[in-house]
Image (tube, helix red, strand yellow):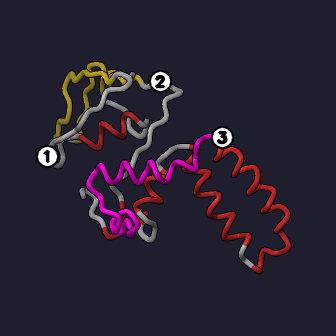
Amino acid sequence: MIAFSRIGKQYGKQVLFVDASFQLNPGEKVGLVGPNGSGKTTLFRMIVGEEAPDEGDVSVPKRLTIGYFRQDVEEMAGRSVLDEAILGSGRAGDLHHELEQLQHAMSDPARAGDLDRILARFGEVQEEYEHLGGYALEAQAREVLHGLGFDDERIDGDVGELSGGW
């Protein structure tokens, strides 16, 4: 359960929240809609711990895994929407990325002297990735992205081509 209790937040003279409270229970699905500048991103930043409220308390279970796709697309340019969605999948996303890096390293002639070490690490990472259900991750990410209205061309396209509010 994620709970916001009597939250207050403002930036300078811009007041976002005054004495706001709500809770999200396991299994609930919630949509967050509002105009630009109304505090939607601030709520997410508070949930993931990137920002604190000026007043009140935010309660998020420590063992909860949260995938969060930031709006700063410029820093993601050159990577696909799918890759970014997978990277937002916690530990399995990190392992997916490391497996890709290790695969590139294995095919790099300049790294031939490190091949035994690279292969050993690949085996370790692959085992943990499989244990976490990582091989189903791409299909799940595609399903979620399709559900959000992305077509295959956008899913496989460069994130840098999207606007932060797409």
Q: Please, what secondary structure does the residue beneath circle 1 have?
A: loop
Q: Is residue 150 above or below residue 52?
A: below
Mark number for residue 61? 2
Q: Is residue 114 above or below residue 61?
A: below
Q: Amino acid at mark 3?
A: His
Q: Amino acid at mark 2?
A: Pro
Q: Nearer the viewer, mark 3 or mark 1?
A: 3
Residue tagged 1: 35
Q: Residue furthest bottom?
A: 109
Pointer 1: residues within 10 angstroms few (<14), some, or many (20+)? few
Q: What residue span does the magenta drawing correspond to? A: 132-160
Q: Please, what secondary structure does the residue beneath circle 3 have?
A: helix
Q: Is residue 142 magenta?
A: yes
Question: What residue appears at the point 83 percent right and 61 percent down from the top-left corner?
Answer: 117
Q: Is residue 86 above or below residue 65?
A: below
Gap between marks 3 and 2, in whole Å? 23 Å
